[in-house]
Amino acid sequence: MEPGYTRMLPNTFTGILTQRLKIRNLEVSDAQRIFEYRSSPEVSRFQSWGTQSADEIQSYISGLSGADPHMPGSWYQTGITLLSGGELIGDCGFCVLESEPRQSEFGITLDPEYQGQGYATEALRALMDYLLVQLGKHRVFGSVDPRNIRSIKLMQRVGLREEAHLVKSLWFKGDWVDDMIFAMLASDWKSRNG
């Protein structure tokens, strides 16, 4: 199959193919794997989801099976797998804003073992294209802890602009922390990517 995007049906997510990756719906059997990499201290430090237990992650994934991925106000999480072998190496998700459905927030997590190989960049570019081109969103954005240097560099590599650095604006794991917002407009994405 050629890299690209599968045709979308309303209220479904059928997957995204890139040169080396497949972004697919999560399966209940992915719960333990997600728990393992999201429990890593270098990952969990910046994550608000996924470090509870494998059982809780399994319950969350079960709930996704009947969910509308484009329902405003709800996060829809997907798995990032290698095309060769199908191993789950991370996950990414998106949430259509309830207050403005033409905008979407996104997030991405990669197992530390697979970082530094271009997989996060490849997956995030595909997710951006899916949201901004295929779904026709006006604007997408991600929230990043300014201490998470790798995520900041990822946002910059993909071409997102830093829109804000909010000081002590987010109550996170028992402390007030800074929050950086990186975003892209559909018009900018399309002009950069033909």
Image (cartoon, rainbow, N blue to C red):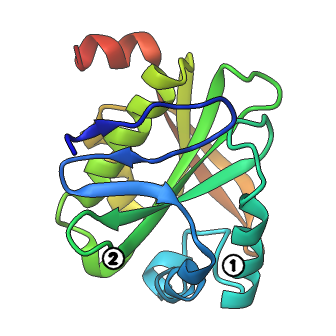
163 displayed left or right of 10: left
Task: Tell me if 139 is positioned left or right of 193 in this view.
Answer: right
| Relative image position of residue 103 (x, y in whole percent) | 64, 25
Tell me, for residue 57, which label it has, or none.
1
The 10 Å Cα crowd at callout 2, few under 14, some 14 to 19, many 20 or more, is some
Q: Nearer the viewer, residue 192 or 65?
A: 65
User: Residue shown at 35%/40% (left/top)?
Assistant: 126
Look at the picture and state if 62 lies above or below 124. Answer: below
CB under 8 Å between discs 1 and 2: no
* Image-quadrant location for residue 44: bottom right
Q: Is residue 7 above or below residue 89?
A: above
Asked if one can make out residue 126 in the rendered structure from this viewpoint, the answer is yes
Residue hosting label 2: 87
Q: Earlier in the sequence, mark 1 or mark 2?
A: 1
x 43%, y 21%: residue: 133
Q: Residue at x 41, y 54 (%)?
A: 23
Amino acid type, residue under disc 1 in the picture: Ile
Q: Position of residue 183 (x, y in %)?
A: 48, 30
Instruction: Compare residues 28 and 160 and report the one nearer the observer.
Output: 28
Write down the quadrant of residue 162 in the picture.
top left
| Circle on res. 118 | none
Question: Neighbour class for label 1 at 10 Å: few (<14), some, many (≥20)?
Answer: many
Residue 76 vs 54, above or below: the answer is above
Q: From the image, state whether disc 1 or disc 2 is nearer to you.
A: 2
